[in-house]
Image (spheres, rainbow, N blue to C red):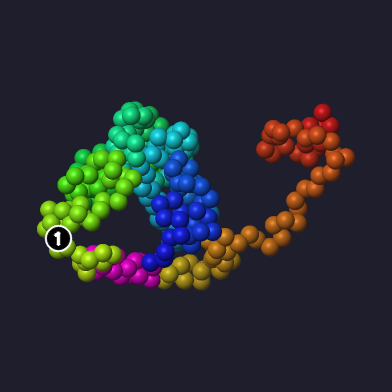
Amino acid sequence: MGISHTPGHSGVWKTPRRGSDHWNFGPGPCERRGDGIAEVALAAHFNRPGHKIVDHYTYVLVSDGDLEEGISSEAGSVAGTSISEADRFICRQTTSTIEGSTELTFTEDRMARFAAFGWHVQRVEQSNDVRCRCARTGKCPRRDGPPSLIAVRTHIGFGSPHKQDTAAAHGEALGVEEVRAYQGGNGLACFASLSRPEEALEHFRRAVARGSVAQAEWEARFQTFAYENPDLAAEFLRVIDRQLPKGWDTDLPAFTPADGPMATRVRFGQSDRDLGLVCRR
């Protein structure tokens, strides 16, 4: 596990594999919406009959804070209208902020908003019912259906006898006594500072083993795909490695002051002749 140098809000160049240079609220779901669009584009370009090398889903864990920002509505609208792929947004509704209840500033019906966008919406009232959450996820539409929003009612500081569902659990450390009270009230042995139970470590290590099996299966399928489609496979590896093709910049237009002012809204696909007319005007 890597160490985040920007805990809470990962930033570009600070935490490995992060490409964002802003806090995740609002723009975060929009970026993941872009991931979903990229997934569709990759599948359409690279998948071939008998070879489905792009077949994943995009799961996004969002919060009240994400949906409170207006830009999330733009991402939700385009997802429900123009692109057919089953993104899954899992909305964590704690109803708590640093200042107090979310009801102070955010009272709209989030599920009704996304339903109006054309999303498939579901609600899970008991966030700790893992089987219920898995069942709800399994009821999401498949890839050719609308995107899904699963609203999960969670409790910030869950299990804390004095701070659960309070602003204090959001912006303050629980403190030694509160942690001990939590452990005792939930049948846990009192652990030393910065320790973790072995059962938790074993649980996550089982996920590593499952991932290794899934990775090996995909690599075997990709090798078969590459044998039959070597050029396409090479292109796929280049794309996922974020490498531009050679010569991508050879045909870029060059502009000088002699070209005159250019209109800011040129219709996509206009010919060079049309473009010149626009510039002269």
Q: Which residue is mark 1?
A: 188
Q: Is residue 256 above or below residue 77?
A: below
Q: Position of residue 91 (x, y in %)?
A: 33, 42
Q: Is residue 204 one of those drawn in magenta?
A: yes
Going 37% across and 50% down the picture, which residue do you hit? Answer: 59
Q: Is residue 68 visible?
A: yes
76 or 213: nearer the viewer: 76
- With 182 as the anchor, is 224 left or right in this view? right
The secondary element bearing badge 1 is classed as loop
Image quarter where the N terminus lies is bottom left
Is 62 magenta? The answer is no
> 229 and 187: which one is in front?
187
Is residue 232 among the parts visible in the rendering? no
Residue 125 placement: quadrant: top left
Q: Between residues 223 and 59, which one lies in front from this camera angle?
A: 59
Is 9 situated left or right of 261 in this image?
left
Q: Amino acid at mark 1?
A: Leu
Looking at the rendering, the stretch of residues picked out in magenta corresponds to 200-216
Residue count near mark 1 (Cα–Cα under 10 Å), binned few <14, some 14–19, many ≥20? few
Instruction: Name the residue rendered at 75%, 32% in the picture.
Output: 263
Q: Residue at x 22, y 66 (%)?
A: 192
Q: Residue at x 40, y 52 (%)?
A: 8
